[in-house]
Image (spheres, rainbow, N blue to C red):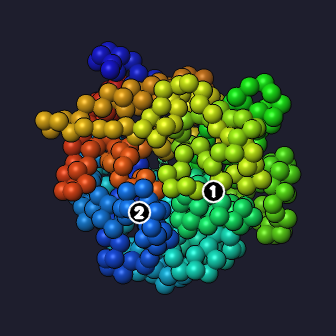
Amino acid sequence: MSTPNEGDALASRFPAAFAWGAATSSYQVEGSTGADGRGKSIWDSFVNEPGRVVDGSNGDTAIDSYRNIAGDVALIKSLGLNSYRFSLSWPRICPDGDGRVNDAGLKYYSDLVDALLAEGITPWITLYHWDLPQALEDAGGWPERATALRFGEFARIAHEALGDRVKHWITVNEPWCSAFLGYASGEHAPGRREPASSIAAAHHLMLGHGLAARAVKAADPEATVSIGLNFYPVHAASADPGDLDAARRVDGVQNRWFTDAALRGAYPEDVVEDFKAVTDFSFVLEGDMETIHAPVEVLSVNYYSRFNVTGNGGATSASAAPTGAGSAWPANEHIGFVPAGLPVTDMGWEIEPQGLTETLKRLHANYPEVAVAVTENGAAFQDKLEGGRVHDLDRLEYVQSHLGACADAVAAGVPLVGYFAWSLADNFEWAWGYTKRFGLVYVDFETGERTVKDSGLWYGDLVRRARSNREAE
Ligand code: IFM
């Protein structure tokens, strides 16, 4: 843990205008899945399939954020944060995924935005964080082009309702997960294992990104548009040519596929060649890449860990699927993920803060035209609530070291505009249910009671130092 002077030193390494925040997503925190006309999402269906979620739980209640705007906003304020990133539940706003709008769903987000702004907290909205309306999945889901078109329409509807007050828009969050965990390995909703469809899904998620980005920009040229991607530094397990090729392939699908499409308007040629083993790309139509290459001001970076890969694997995904899933790597089933011997979080993810510096510097070198924000960073650990406190030194050190890594990137000239801890509070961790806690705030999943963990107290203290140093300047 840092001394006050060390805290000041770290705080002073960040730019004056900086988004200090925490992040959540709709299905993970809202609950009230049957309330006020909300439609069903693919996660509502998936969690009811036996064996899909490790503890058999679901998001029906989650941490009850839908009914607790005042409590959540007070918590964010108590941490001293000036920004909050949350996602819109598409089926809460458009129950059938089409143009029919549920005003009660929109009102929830409008009220949340008003409550945040009243406390001086800037909302950063994510339009899609994995809860696709079930009606659209019934019509084929992301492998179908129509889903991307519907998403563009949804972005317009959401912006029309909230764009007068919200200036930061993230289109899709971690399309790698939606496409490859959702449609290739089946670890995530909708749980399909169709390698070719997963690549079509990846393309349509990017097309949806382009359409949404353009819808937001058309309505408000001053809006800041972003896409949220999960990046990993990829290392070859050895100098063996097979391992080196595996590193190229994993880096290509995980890191370059999405950035090159969004910021260059083209998929990386080597990855296209690899994917030709399973698809003919007939779903890429003329003009799609131009649409995808939409104006983006900020690249949203979600960073948790690094990969060490071999060409002699057969691993499913790097996140060690809890429920016996298939491969998340179409055309690359021979690759595998091997430990590099670093300390790990409760997810089994290796901890490497300098990988974040490396990632930010690489992105800035390759795409100097965009600013970057760290929109997710955090760690799951087994927490214990004892005597009203959670002494989560492991998480505190994780956040501290990764903020140090961010400051190193800033010192190297990276235009970093924000940092959002994942997550504001413990919540529903997808196929891991409630067994993994990522929050700065501990949640008693029985009562909903919130307790700020030591990591949250430390982060709040750092943010206050950073903000007050700058305000005093
Ligand atoms: O909880 C998830 C979040 O929804 C997306 N990014 C990774 C987090 C931790 O797994």
Q: What residue sits 85% from the left and 65% below the top?
A: 280
- Camera-side residue of 132 and 209: 132
Q: Badge 1, how many Cα within 10 Å: few under 14, some, many 20+?
A: many
Amino acid, disc 2: Tyr
Q: Earlier in the sequence, mark 1 or mark 2?
A: 2
x, y (%) of residue 70? Answer: 22, 58
Q: Which residue is mark 2?
A: 27
Q: Can I make out residue 218 in this image? A: no
User: Which residue is label 1 attached to?
Assistant: 326
Residue 28 horizontal side relative to residue 314, left or right: left
Identified at 57% across, 65% down, the residue is 191
Disc ID at residue 175 = none
Residue flagged by tag 1: what amino acid is it? Answer: Gly
| Outermost residue to the bottom | 100
Quarter residue 453 falls in = top left
Q: Position of residue 76 (x, y in %)?
A: 29, 47
